[in-house]
Image (cartoon, coloured by chain):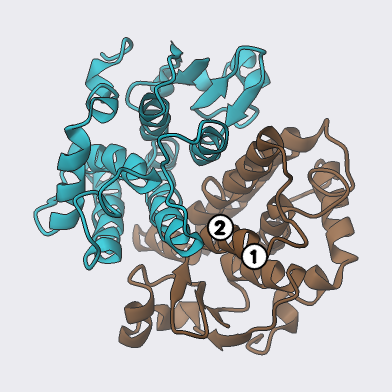
Chain colours: A brown, B cyan
């Protein structure tokens, strides 16, 4: 399998973790997002959205959207599971993953920040936007799991929730968010980082890291 | 079951369609988004994200995030299915649903548009933002299904993809998008609107419609 992505893309990072948790080897092709390489003609053939990540299977089939890829991984490589078995528990894990993937990540990604900049705003304003989106969004995520059992987001095993959380915390720090009031999120992150599937998937350890 | 939502919320609209397709009766509680009613203390107890929709079960359990609710509906009420059976086909349907739910909807929702306004931009600029996000995003969605068989997004039955598409097309029209270059999306919408589950779920037919 080949992951089309970028070391710093949080959505690519999610898929790296998912593949590593499932024990699946993969190669990587890198697209420098700030240069717009993900909108080149050859990649648009693979993913008309012009976004990373995409997962290309050995037969050339291309899967897009990180959460759809994670669900596909779970359905085709069930062990170890990244979703619980009970439908209600699955709904909670998915809701947490979506709270990050819908309500935080897309509103602070490079494309949107470039749009804010194009409206005439300077770097402090653009970074302020991203910091606010991450801070407010993660504060709500903390509440979603505050009363639940750790050390991971949902119990004693990593799930799709943790897979989305860890990359987003990286973004939040990059934008200067104070995470000290989010003890459950930090507990989950620490539990994840003790696992090679997470620690080997960090942006800094990817071949395209700058 | 009780759906906490708002007639004009595209994410609430998705859940209305899902419940109707599954033949499940539900009551509705409405939150006027522009008045911030979804951030009232009582609702924050149900959903700390302060967003609609939330689905409250008869035992008081609350589910959040429209796509997590739709997956839960599919797992607990499998017929009629809103996802295909084959993992790869499921991945394509989910990717389409996520292309709308992650990459279009959150970047043009009321909260983000208010942030753009707060940066000092007037209504034409704010609407221009929303129009661009819908237009560019839906153009990519058209490409995702352009070569596939209709009349629905993915074949001869409505799926989670159609459930996300129809509400988003409503938003796109509200912001003045020209949809004439998206024949497959319009074909899928027409097929959906011939079904009562879709036609009865439109915003204009909800009890809280203004």
Of all chains, the one bearing label 1 is A
A22 versus B126 height, above or below: below
Name the foreground residue: A22 vs A124: A22
Crowd around label 2: few <14 · some 14–19 · many ≥20 (10 Å): many
Check chain identity for marks 2 and 1: say if they share one. Answer: yes
Q: Are marks 2 and 1 in contact (CB under 8 Å)?
A: yes
Left or right of residue B78: residue A173? right
The numbered mark at residue A14 is: 1
Residue B62 seen in the figure: yes
The numbered mark at residue A67 is: 2
Look at the image and tell me in which quarter the C terminus of chain B lies: top left
Please tell me in which quadrant of the rendered image residue B165 appears: top left
Residue B121 seen in the figure: no
Q: Secondary structure at mark 1?
A: helix
Instruction: Please provide percent x and percent y for residue B123.
Output: 25, 38
Left or right of residue A209: residue A69? left
Residue at 42% across, 40% down: B81
Q: Secondary structure at mark 2?
A: helix
Q: Label 2 vs label 1: CA separation? A: 8 Å
Which residue appears farthest toward the left when viewing the image? Answer: B180
A210 versus A177 height, above or below: below
Instruction: Please provide percent x and percent y for residue B118.
Output: 42, 39
Crowd around label 1: few <14 · some 14–19 · many ≥20 (10 Å): many
Name the foreground residue: A103 vs A4: A4
Residue at 44% across, 34% down: B79
Looking at the image, is mark 2 or mark 1 earlier in the sequence?
A: 1
């Amino acid at each position: 399998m080949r992951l089309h992505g970028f070391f710093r893309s949080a959505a690519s990072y999610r898929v790296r973790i998912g593949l590593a948790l499932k024990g699946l080897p993969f190669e990587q092709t890198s697209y420098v997002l700030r240069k717009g390489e993900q909108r080149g003609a050859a990649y648009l053939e693979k993913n008309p959205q012009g976004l990373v990540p995409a997962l290309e299977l050995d037969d050339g089939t291309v899967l897009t959207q990180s959460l759809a890829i994670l669900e596909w991984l779970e359905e085709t490589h069930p062990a170890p599971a990244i979703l619980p078995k009970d439908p209600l528990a699955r709904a909670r894990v998915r809701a947490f993953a979506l709270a990050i993937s819908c309500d935080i990540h897309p509103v602070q990604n490079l494309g949107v920040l470039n749009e804010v900049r194009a409206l005439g705003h300077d770097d402090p304003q653009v970074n302020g936007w991203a910091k606010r989106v991450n801070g407010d969004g993660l504060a709500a995520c903390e509440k979603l799991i505050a009363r639940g059992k750790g050390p991971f987001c949902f119990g004693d095993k990593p799930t799709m929730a943790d897979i989305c959380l860890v990359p987003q915390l990286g973004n939040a720090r990059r934008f200067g968010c104070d995470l000290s009031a989010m003890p459950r999120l930090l507990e989950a992150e620490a539990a994840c980082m003790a696992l090679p599937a997470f620690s080997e998937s960090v942006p800094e350890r990817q071949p395209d890291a700058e």
